[in-house]
Amino acid sequence: MIGSDRGPRRALRRIARASVLRVAAVCALALPLAACATPPTTRDMFGEYLRSTDVIGDEFQSANSQARVAAFATMGSPEELIGRLMAPRPCQASGCVRPWEQGGGSNKPAPGLDAANALAGPNGRFYERKVLVKRDDDKLELISLYLVHKADGTKLLVDSKKESHTGGLDGFRKTNDVLGSDDFMLVTRDITAVSGKSEIVVVSGHVAPSRKPWLIGGAVVLVAVIALWVIMRRVRKT
């Protein structure tokens, strides 16, 4: 009788082990894929900015979305508005030029201005570049990056942490600590240029993949392994 029970027990153990491992594998693969957000289009992201009254760091304050859209309509077409918003703004130590007089937001210097001024030196120039960011929690934020054109021709980007970056937009996305790979930027492709027309694009805030989904997947696998161990112990005791 004892010998006759070994076959079913072994089969049950194999089934339990295989089932748990399959579930663990599916969870570990599915979670990182589910965490990958689809980037918004340029049109959708800027349209959301035009309507939203909750943009962090915005220069325009409106009582409601309807009043905001109406105010923007008096300033030009959407193409003209995005061009003026993203245009480089000449700066000096005390602050930067605004491209319009309308709007109730503050124009106080953003963090990084003093660092940009120091990097530019007495013979260099520096500018403010506005970047619209859609955070991973779907909130919009208007941030400032500073473009530094040094006298020797070197071009740098300075962020709000006063860190400088070379390599243009791609270089900033590789080395910055202010945006994550789950954030999206509405920005000019040739971000260090101060003349000519540059394409407006939506890109991730950082090129390095986020480790959070993989950590979650690893935790799921660990839980599954523990569950398998518990099941195997119970099967052996029966």
Image (cartoon, rainbow, N blue to C red):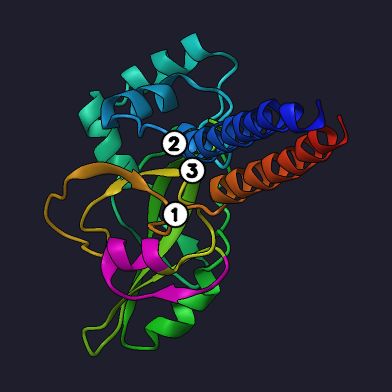
Which disc number belongs to residue 97? none
Residue behind mark 2 = 33
Q: Residues within 10 Å of mark 3 (few under 14, many from 20)?
A: some
Q: Which residue is drawn at 41% across and 16% down?
A: 69
Q: Distance between the residues labelled 1 and 3?
A: 23 Å
Image spot of residue 212 (x, y percent): 59, 49
Quadrant assignment for the C terminus: top right
Residue behind mark 3 = 142
Q: Residues within 10 Å of mark 2 (few under 14, many from 20)?
A: few
Type of residue at label 2? Answer: Leu
Q: Can residue 209 be seen in this view?
A: yes
From the viewer's perspective, is the residue at label 1 or at label 3 nearer?
Answer: 1
From the viewer's perspective, is the residue at label 1 or at label 2 nearer?
Answer: 2
Q: Residue at x 13, y 49 (%)?
A: 197
Residue behind mark 1 = 209
Image spot of residue 87 (x, y percent): 28, 50
Image spot of residue 28 (x, y percent): 54, 40
Nearer the observer, 70 or 186: 186
Instruction: Point out the stretch of residues depicted in magenta.
Output: 161-174
User: On the image, which quarter does residue 17 sit in?
Assistant: top right
Type of residue at label 1? Answer: Pro
Disc 3 is placed on an element classified as strand
Type of residue at label 3? Answer: Leu
- Drawn side of residue 87 relative to residue 183, left or right: left
